[in-house]
Image (cartoon, grey):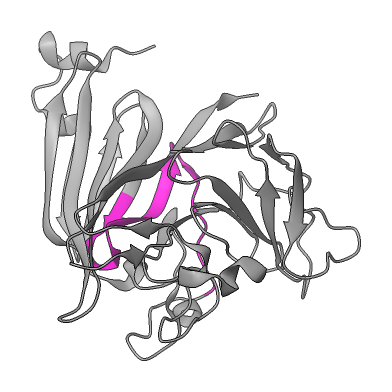
């Protein structure tokens, strides 16, 4: 195993950006880490994560939409994929009241965006920071203070959020971290391993389908949206084999006690969404106050987040 920091210490590498590169261009912060991941951070999309690579292998899914047509179009028309799309803090799931599908975070530009490269005992760590404001003059005022953290030698990226109610009224705040995995690591027959009691589906389950097993791609295959009940360990693993690594998604179970999945194996789509959340995505609980989301009191904050890691082969 390469000691990445030692390359700097003994003079074999003159500049840290040879090992931990950060390139800002066209509104994208491109992070490339030796022995780690290469990924794009998207300031115009709430500091969510775009294209992500493990070596020469893509990890993140890309949607069938070639470009974002811009404001005025629905969320699905503007969704380009990427490793992470954050949903909320006003809504998750189908449109509700004045809130559109999956809320505003993913389409809200971040402010005070900056990055740093820090020397650690093991090597170099890159941190991208910013604030995503969900505010109104007379209504709710929610701030999401985000850090995106990744290091050399560790093929993982972590998103850490502090969600603050800086207004003067209680607000129901639904959050869902929409982690999108695609081919080639998503492949026919692969299983998502989740330690849970059972699952329920939003629509009737199509014949020969399972929410946690991805079938062969086929024309017109319907998406399957499921919630997994009694989840333990705040962990879901796309199980590898001799040729493919595990992809492990972990999250803060105290603030994200629920897990949903979105399996859409149609030809030209072929995606698995792993979706830790704090609120119901579907079902009768959405008729409750705040659509079943927990309430953040004035002055309160939550610390929450998600980590996506590639963990070896076989």
Residue drawn at (40%, 66%) of the image: 88
* Image x and y of residue 20, in percent: 21, 33
Residue drawn at (58%, 70%) of the image: 286
Residue drawn at (30%, 29%) of the image: 34
* Image x and y of residue 60, in percent: 49, 52
Tell me if I can see residue 211 in this picture.
Answer: yes
Say which quadrant the N terminus sits in: top left
Q: Is residue 92 above or below residue 229?
A: below
Residue drawn at (77%, 75%) of the image: 220
* Image x and y of residue 147, in percent: 24, 44
**Residue 128 or residue 68, whichever sits in front:** 128
**Residue 30 or residue 163, whichever sits in front:** 163
Q: Is residue 283 above or below residue 216?
A: below
Question: In the shown orientation, is residue 175 left or right of residue 280?
Answer: left
Q: Is residue 277 magenta?
A: no
Give the farthest residue toward the right: 207
* Image x and y of residue 118, in percent: 13, 28
Question: In the shown orientation, is residue 183 left or right of residue 221?
Answer: left
Tell me if I can see residue 282 in this picture.
Answer: no
Q: Is residue 62 magenta?
A: yes
Q: Is residue 197 above or below residue 136?
A: above
Q: Which image quadrant is residue 115 in?
A: top left
- Which stretch did the figure color magenta? 40-64
């Amino acid at each position: 195993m390469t000691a990445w920091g030692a390359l700097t210490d003994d003079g074999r590498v003159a500049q840290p950006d040879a090992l931990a590169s950060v390139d800002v261009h066209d509104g994208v912060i491109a992070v490339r880490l030796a022995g780690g991941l290469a990924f794009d951070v998207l300031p115009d999309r709430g500091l969510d994560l775009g294209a992500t690579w493990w070596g020469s292998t893509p990890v993140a899914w890309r949607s069938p939409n070639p470009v974002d047509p811009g404001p005025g179009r629905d969320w699905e028309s503007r969704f380009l994929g990427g490793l992470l799309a954050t949903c909320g803090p006003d809504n998750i799931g189908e449109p509700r009241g004045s809130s559109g599908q999956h809320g505003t975070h993913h389409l809200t530009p971040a402010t005070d965006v900056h990055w740093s490269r820090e020397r650690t005992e093991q090597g170099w760590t890159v941190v991208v920071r910013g604030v995503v404001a969900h505010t109104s003059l007379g209504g709710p005022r929610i701030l999401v203070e985000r850090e995106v953290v990744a290091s050399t030698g560790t093929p993982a990226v972590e998103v850490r959020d502090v969600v603050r109610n800086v207004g003067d009224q209680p607000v129901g705040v639904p959050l869902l971290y929409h982690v999108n995995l695609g081919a080639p690591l998503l492949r026919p027959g692969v299983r998502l391993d989740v330690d849970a009691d059972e699952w329920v589906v939003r629509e009737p389950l199509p014949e020969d389908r399972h929410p946690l097993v991805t079938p062969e791609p086929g024309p017109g295959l319907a998406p399957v949206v499921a919630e997994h009940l009694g989840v333990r360990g705040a962990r879901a693993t796309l199980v590898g084999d001799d040729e493919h690594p595990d992809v492990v998604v972990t999250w803060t179970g105290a603030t994200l006690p629920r897990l949903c999945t979105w399996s859409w194996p149609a030809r030209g789509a072929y995606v698995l969404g792993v979706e830790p959340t704090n609120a119901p995505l579907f079902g009768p609980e959405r008729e409750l106050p705040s659509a079943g989301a927990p309430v953040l009191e004035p002055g309160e904050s939550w610390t929450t987040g998600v980590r996506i890691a590639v963990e070896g082969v076989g």
